[in-house]
Amino acid sequence: MHSPSHSPKNSWVVLYLALGVVWGCSFIFIKLGLDFLTPFGVAFGRCALGAATLLAWARYKKIPLPKSGKLWAHLWVVSLLLNVIPGVLFALAETEVTSILAGIINAVTPLMTLIAIMLVTRDEKPKFYQVIGILIGFIGVLTVLGAWKGMGENPLWAVLVLLAAVTCYGFSFPYSRRFVLPHKLQPESIAAAQVTTGAITLLPFYLFDGIARDYYRPGPVFAMLALGIFGS
């Protein structure tokens, strides 16, 4: 019988694995969502469903949302870098490439984050092993993409769009660390405000060009629900 003191140490493993499964499947969900939505529609649906989920959760847990207008402005920038632009770009690229390739390129995010931190933060100079790691990472990405064979069957523009998306991810972390995290807000409050501003930003684009087809199959609809609700 396990003692109660062990459960907190092990609970993070279950949560981490669940998070990995949900986020890993998100690229499949995006692909399915494109069955009846445009890239703008997929990005908006993800943010809108996420916002509804997180706002309801914050209300249930009585977690206050940010009150500072300046902080909301910073969270809007974070939502652009983490939700709006990458959400549209990943969906746009997946109209031409597989969800597998999208997931592989998404794994470049830590590499882009390291580069962004070194470019943005002046007091953090790159160490030798970090430079070597970046070079190895780039070689690995080029190898996976088949750069030596002309990118294979993957359109160059779609690959560049995916790289632009993860670059946005990379720059979002140092920005958030500098302008958002010092406010010491609860994670649920930050996430709820972030995806809400993202949904509001994407709403006009969704209304203008969000629906690709007038009929809906259950599979893609459930995929969008999972993408927005559980991915949040």
Image: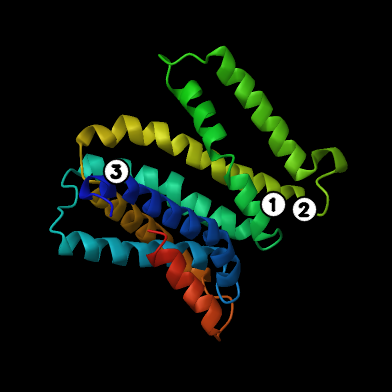
* Distance in Å between CA atoms under marks 1 and 3: 30 Å
User: Is residue 204 in view from this perspective?
Assistant: no
N-terminal of the two: label 1 or label 3?
3
From this view, report whether residue 136 is shown above or below residue 87: above
Of circles 2 and 1, the one toward us is 2
**Residue 177 or residue 73, whichever sits in front:** 177
Asked if disc 2 and disc 1 are in contact, CB closer than 8 Å, the reply is yes
Q: Residue at x 43, y 57 (%)?
A: 18
Which residue in the protein does label 2 denote?
Answer: 154
From this view, report whether residue 160 is shown above or below residue 228: above
SS assignment at label 1: helix
**Residue 93 or residue 19, whichever sits in front:** 19
Q: Residue at x 50, y 72 (%)?
A: 223
**Residue 189 or residue 39, whichever sits in front:** 189
Query: Is residue 120 found left or right of 149 in the rendered image?
Result: left
SS assignment at label 3: helix
SS assignment at label 2: loop
* Distance in Å between CA atoms under marks 2 and 1: 7 Å
Which residue in the protein does label 1 denote?
Answer: 158
Q: Residue at x 76, y 38 (%)?
A: 143
Which residue in the protein does label 3 denote?
Answer: 73
Of circles 1 and 3, the one toward us is 1
